Amino acid sequence: MTIIGGALPITLQLALYATLISLFVAIPIGIVAALNENGWIDLVATSGSLLGLAIPNFWLGIVLMILFAVKFQFFPPSGYVSLGEDPIDHFRHMVLPSATLAAWMVVPLIRYLRSELIRVLKKDYIRTARMKGLTELLVVGKHAMRNSLIPFITQLGMLIGEQVGGTIVIEQVFAIPGMGRTALSAVFAREYQIVMGVVLVLAMGFILINLVVDIVYVFLDPRIRIGK
Amino acid sequence: MDSRIRSLTKSKLLLAGVFLMSVLVILAILSPYLTRWGPIQVNYDDYLSPPSSIHPFGTDELGRDLFTRILFGTRIAFRVGFIAVAISSIVGIPLGLVSGYYGGAVDMIVSRVFDAFFAFPFILLALTITIILGPSETTAMIAVGIAYIPSYGRIARAATISIRGETFLEAARAIGASNRRIIIHTVFPNCIGPILVIMSLGFGYAVLSEAALSFIGIGTKPPTPAWGLILASGKRYVVEAPWYSLFPGLAILLLVLSTNLIGEGLRNIIEVE
């Protein structure tokens, strides 16, 4: 039990940073791509997505490691330092793994946001908002985004769930003692209890995320009320 | 027929993908003739050497020529891809077709099962299957095949549902065709489009997944030159021999890129129709 307890927060941190990074990157690009449909940013984004989906994320991790940790010694290549010990070192260690994990999440997010936003921007209420004289910022930022966010968040929730697979591999690449690593060593050591424990925790986490997503729905779309 | 071929050639994505794929297939078939080394031929004197004229990709820690290993890895990748896609399609597509056609209780049960599988993170599923069957290339193939069954099933089901109300279905029933006959001869041919798309895309993802499994050690076992395995060894020597990890990853990337191009190209064509 304590093994999992020690490993869980590490994986959670990794997942959290990766999600944040990917959102920071994906949302602006998605919005810009949708606004300039078929403009050059859009084309770069869409063709980039085909390439991006083909890149094995563990390879990307290794390449990043080679670039930033071996060639230019910016970040440490592996290992983990907890937040309590040394915050700066903690983040230095977490940059590369989180970035690798984020890279893999960015592509579907951009795709999804872009297509949803494009669909919403064609709606009549957007036209109304523009006719009312609202600034473009308000039209897109508030009205359009609000409506595209619901399917987007669903997708995000699913991606976070799939992240699990990604973390296992990336923890292996960067030698981070998280849940994935623990589960893997347990499999090799035939320690079935640990594996079951990990699966259980991950399943609970997945359910939790879906629950959070559902709750967020209520805030985003006033038409949905609990108990409806 | 003529216009179909024309629209096929019009899609540059598709052409690029097919071209890339053909190159890879040829490389796979001609592997033994393209190098003078064997894929597991060791040479303890010449280990971890950088790319040179004798060893275009360098050598690994046992002195094996990396170019040869990666070349032969292409064969493994194709093998895995084919069998995994075969498993997923043979099980998933009929289930999806039947579930979409009959609807009702059958549909509900099948859909729930699909959802359950789908919700399960792939690696955990693969881990479980590996514990039962023991790590090997075959286990990886089976694990990947099983894991993607719901994706194929869903697409088949969605395609079936979308043509459910069409008149030609009614017509087929009117002339007394049995349900089985209708599904096989009428429904299925109309769903071929999306099915082909997911088969192409799925091939790439199967290869990617198998590479990931081999990478973390629960897939193909050494000394078989699977790309994922080569990457795993490459990681160990990333400081002394950074080139080691570069090429297997590129190989994976090229293969999956080709399948993605083909899949996207097909999708564009189908959606126009």
Image (cartoon, coloured by chain):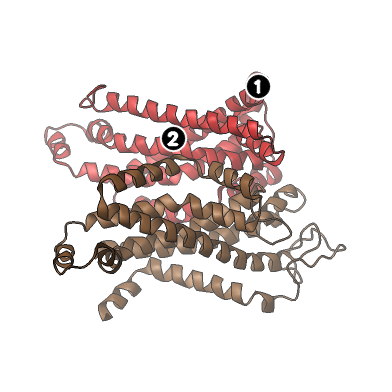
Chain colours: A red, B brown
- In the displayed structure, B187 sits above or below A195; it is below
- In the displayed structure, A140 sits above or below B205; it is above
Provide residue A50's location: percent of width, then percent of height: 44, 56
> In the figure, is residue B46 to the left or right of B112?
right
Q: Residue at x 70, y 69 (%)?
A: B68
Q: Label 2's element?
A: helix
Q: Amino acid at mark 2?
A: Phe
Q: Amino acid at mark 1?
A: Thr
Quadrant the N terminus of chain A occupies: top right
Of the numbered discs in the image, which one, if any, rests on residue A24? 2
> In the figure, is residue B60 to the left or right of B269?
right
> In the figure, is residue A150 to the left or right of A212?
left
Residue A55, visible in the rendered structure: no
Provide residue B5's location: percent of width, then percent of height: 31, 77
Of the numbered discs in the image, which one, if any, rests on residue A2? 1
Q: Residue at x 67, y 77 (%)?
A: B34
Q: Nearer the viewer, residue B106 or A80?
A: B106
Answer with the quarter of the image where residue B160 lies. Answer: bottom left
Q: Earlier in the sequence, mark 1 or mark 2?
A: 1
